[in-house]
Amino acid sequence: MTSSAIDDLTGQLAQLLPSRGLMVCTAESCTGGLIAAACTDRAGSSVWFERGFVSYSNAAKTDLLGVPCDLIVRHGAVSQEVARAMAAGALAHAQAQLAVAVTGVAGPGGGSADKPVGTVWLAWAMGSQVRTERQHFEGDRSAVRQATVVRALQGLIEMLQTGP
């Protein structure tokens, strides 16, 4: 995916969010703030982007987003349950109405048989509704992270267009 694809997606968000009077926040692990950076690269994003949480470590997921430690222990940081809790926690700790959360294995190491490199869980939350999705992206660390940003932005647009 190219930066023009990301520009197009953030352009759509720049139209959709203000027209609905909504703001978005991010909770990022494997992308380390790239989704927030993509949003805030767009001039005028302060109208629709509220804040970003970079919760790279397990402790940060707990401290910043309120993800229960036992949830991480039971399911692992890269799991549907943790992605869901990250998205809900972002909404609880922000003044936004829509959140996206990502947690994954960008590589080159850190993968396992159950969660190989390229495995990413994404979650989108709006109100009390949360959608989750597991993806497996191919390529090196940069490619996995870029693909995650694109899919995260696409999911935000889908949620705005179809509802939670």
Image (cartoon, rainbow, N blue to C red):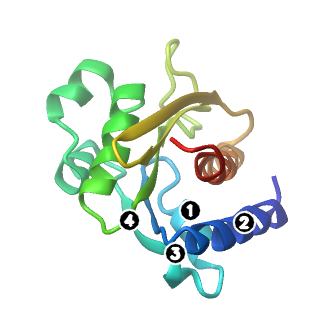
> Sequence-wise, which precedes: disc 4 or disc 3?
3
Q: Position of residue 28 (x, y in %)?
A: 44, 53
Left or right side of 49 for 95? left
- CA gap, disc 4 and disc 3: 9 Å
* Neighbours of disc 1 within 10 Å: few (<14), some (14-19), many (20+): some
**Label 4: which secondary element:** loop
Q: Residue at x 16, y 34 (%)?
A: 69
Dot placed on the residue nearer the N-terminal end, 3 or 2: 2
> If you read the primary sequence from the N terminus, does the residue marked by circle 4 or circle 1 appear first?
1
**Residue type at mark 3?**
Trp
Looking at the image, can residue 111 be seen?
Answer: yes
Residue corresponding to mark 4: 96
Of callouts 1 and 3, the N-terminal one: 1
Q: Which residue is mark 2?
A: 12
> Residue 86: x and y, percent?
34, 44
Q: Could you tell me how far apart the alpha carbons at marks 1 and 3 are, in whole angstroms?
A: 17 Å
> On screen, 123 above or below 43?
above
Task: Give the residue drawn at x 60%, y 53%.
Answer: 160
Residue 137 percent location from the top left of the image: 69, 33
In the rendered structure, which amino acid carries the disc numbered 4? Answer: Ala
Give the x, y percent position of residue 150: 69, 51
Q: Amino acid at mark 2?
A: Gln
Whichever of callouts 4 and 2 sits on the residue coming sooner in the sequence is: 2
Q: Amino acid at mark 1?
A: Leu
SS state under label 1: helix
Separation of marks 3 and 2 at Cα, in angstroms: 11 Å
Please name the residue that numbered disc 3 is placed on: 48
